[in-house]
Amino acid sequence: MTATPAAALLRVRDLKTYFVTEHGRGTARAVDEVSFDLYPGETLGIVGESGCGKTVTSLSILRLVPEPPGHILPGSLIEFEGRNLLALAPPELRSIRGNQIAMIFQEPMTSLNPVFTVGDQIAEAAIIHQRLSRRAARARAIEMLKLVGIPDPEQRVDDYPHQMSGGMRQRVMIAMALICHPKVLIADEPTTALDVTIQAQILELLDRLQHELGMAVLLITHDLGVVAGHTDRVVVMYAGRVVETASTTELFEHPTHPYTEGLLAAVPRVDTPRSRLHAIPGQVPAATAWPTGCRFHPRCPYAWEKCVAQEPPLLDAGGGEGEGGRHTARCWLVTEPERRQAKR
Amino acid sequence: MTAPPAPPPVAAPLVDVRDLVKHYAAERRWFGLGRPRPPVRAVDGVSFTIPSGRTLGLVGESGSGKTTVGRTMLRLQEATGGRVLFEGRDVFALDSRALRALRRRMQIVFQDPYSSLNPRMTVQETLREPLEIHGLAGTVAALLDEVGLDAVFAKRYPHELSGGQRQRVGIARALSVEPQFIVCDEPVSALDVSVQAQVLNLLADLQARRRLTYLFIAHDLAVVRHIADDVAVMYLGKIVERAPAAEIYALPRHPYTRALLSAVPEPDPKAKKNRIVLSGDVPSPAMPPPGCPFHPRCPHPLKSARCRTEVPPLREVPAGSGHLAACHYAEQPMK
Ligand SMILES: Nc1ncnc2c1ncn2[C@@H]1O[C@H](COP(=O)(O)OP(=O)(O)OP(=O)(O)O)[C@@H](O)[C@H]1O
Ligand SMILES: Nc1ncnc2c1ncn2[C@@H]1O[C@H](COP(=O)(O)OP(=O)(O)OP(=O)(O)O)[C@@H](O)[C@H]1O
Ligand SMILES: [Mg+2]
Ligand SMILES: [Mg+2]
């Protein structure tokens, strides 16, 4: 579970993925200079406002961004075991995708093919990458369905996606992703459609595979309870940028970026009675028109002139030199902490 | 549609669901291969009422029939049995014209926003359509503003939106026709917590302003706690517990509810976990176990032979409390 300063399995550097929106309404800078590392055996959480670029980041890693309208800009680097995925030829890429790097997609219904049974779709990766026979692959598919807690797997393997509930489809996606024992699993909101007992079961399954196989997980989730319980480090994104990184305990104890602070305050809790929830005021800007200066400044309770004029870099927020790596925040408050106090 | 100054203490139910049943027949295999399958008993005798202006939270196991309840209530799917009364009128007996009129007053926000939006229509077109059909005064800009989306999104297509942005378009569409009742099927599960808080506050404000009634389907018990007046818990097509929200969170009387509450992940990396782990296979809704449907996985220390043979009825414990539970040992709930 611990991140060792060994070689990173996956390195993302200055990733920029833009979309030309239809009818020439401008360029959506969906992912804008995103960098992070993923180490073997660790779980890195990505959290952030809806529309901030989490899904596009993960799709970029597997080069699944539809081109056009999307494109990954030159100067971006995505390195897996020392190889730049952005420079690989399609056949090489295919041998990695779904085999060494697998992905659980956010919307199961759109990524499952409605005309094939779920069993065929789960088995496919095992047939292609592990060269299993049809019969063996089917048996593996049933085994995987059982592992993700689908009742009656021998029967359900022949279901079509529309015959399953939302949560079952999500587990089918998980089964597909895990069948080849990938080294890196990118899980985009893998448990949003699941009830908490099954969610716990799935997350434990991921934890176990991680221990047994040293799999690294990039976990995109908006559930901060899941982040707290199942990640080692966290990357917080806002408006296409990384705005804070820290070890999970450090982030929860010392949230530094005002967006992170607002996020943690908005979490509904099961042990507090009905009440109005804290929400960050204002709206998420559109990716075609990010604000100038710090992209969070129009919604920030602390913002001052400097924040409007100049975007802060990722600054060292201190307190995080330990095993979880550095704690950084893209916020001028790091240089002028007294301003935070004044507001409180 | 302005709210009356003070709601009566016990409002008449706006929605009254009685013994709702939905079975899916097993599809016949081609070439006659494979054994014939029994039907999936997706919803198996579900009853509840929702008073006007209130929210019933519906939680439960994945695949337990929550979405099916919502869809059959609005006749997006035909029920196998039972009745649904909306303001005292039998929804299942309406002809197609009356049903269309009713659709304006009963809306749904779908669990999967992508497949429920027309990919060839911009957000603006999607939202304008119902306004025009029903001759309503609302504007697309006002609707987008209500759900916290910038006006620039009006010209986008669904594939140009993130998951959470799409979900808000789905909510805006449901609100556009000014309904009285909305089935919200996991309306915030795709949203990050700050947008989620905005949408939940919005739903609460709309409820106060327009006296809206919600069936709120969710798996996040913390979210349900913040929106629901009453909570019903489903397991294998049946309601196994139903109570006022404060009551069910303080003293869950069904062991499945207890297990659900114990599994809620805490937003604190140092939290101690006392999760009740359910063992045993998840049973199939095509072949529910005899006796109590939960018995094969039940962790209750008092579990007995009776649980394997006798179906526990949904009954009020203690009498007069309004707290219903389907457990033989509801008087001695698990700690
Ligand atoms: N094909 C596209 N054309 C134009 N803009 C796009 C396209 N796909 C995504 N975007 C924009 O890129 C931004 C990032 O989207 P992304 O799906 O990565 O968000 P996200 O962080 O995953 O959000 P969520 O939590 O809601 O899933 C959004 O503002 C979205 O509107
Ligand atoms: N069209 C269909 N044909 C056959 N079976 C179906 C169909 N739709 C749903 N089912 C089955 O009915 C049961 C209930 O499904 P439903 O979608 O109502 O569950 P749910 O409680 O909403 O679950 P989730 O929390 O995962 O969304 C499941 O076993 C599902 O596989
Ligand atoms: Mg996303
Ligand atoms: Mg559902």
Image (tube, grey):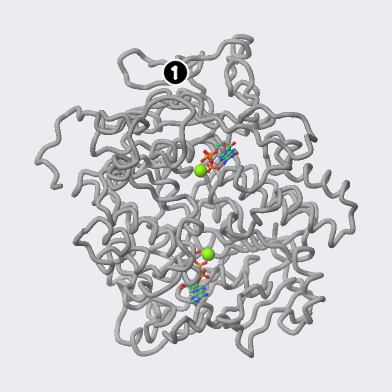
In the rendered image, the residue lying farthest to the left is B5
Task: From the top left corner, tell me how far across and down residue B101 is, in percent.
Answer: 27, 44
Residue A71 in view of the camera:
yes
- Where's residue A176, x and y in %? 72, 54
Report the side of A146 relative to B320 (left or right): right
Q: In the image, is the residue at mark 1 within 8 Å of ligand 2 by its beta carbon? A: no
Quick one: label 1, few (<14), some, or many (20+) residues within 10 Å? some
In the image, B301 versus B320, the foreground residue is B320
Q: Is residue A213 above or below residue A298?
A: above
Q: Is residue B204 left or right of residue B256?
A: left
Amino acid carrying mark 1 in the image: Leu
The image shows residue A307, relative to residue B100, as above or below, that is below
Q: Is residue B258 something that shows in the picture?
A: no
Quarter occupied by residue B132 = bottom left
Which quadrant would residue A25 be assigned to in this image? bottom left
Between B175 and B96, the one nearer to me in the picture: B96
Q: Secondary structure at mark 1?
A: loop
Q: Nearer the viewer, residue A95 or B71?
A: B71
Write the residue at 29% across / 54% down: B175
| Picture coordinates of residue B12, whole percent (x, y) | 21, 28
Q: Quadrant of residue A288?
A: bottom left
B250 vs B107: above or below:
above
Please state which of residues B187 and B30 is positioned toward the viewer in this rendering. Answer: B30
Question: Total number of numbered labels?
Answer: 1
Horizontally, residue B316 falls left or right of residue A46, namely: left
- Residue B194: percent from the left, percent from the top? 39, 60
Circle 1 marks a residue in which chain? B
Q: Which residue is mark 1?
A: B314
Measuring 62% from the left and 29% from the top, which residue is drawn there?
Answer: B39
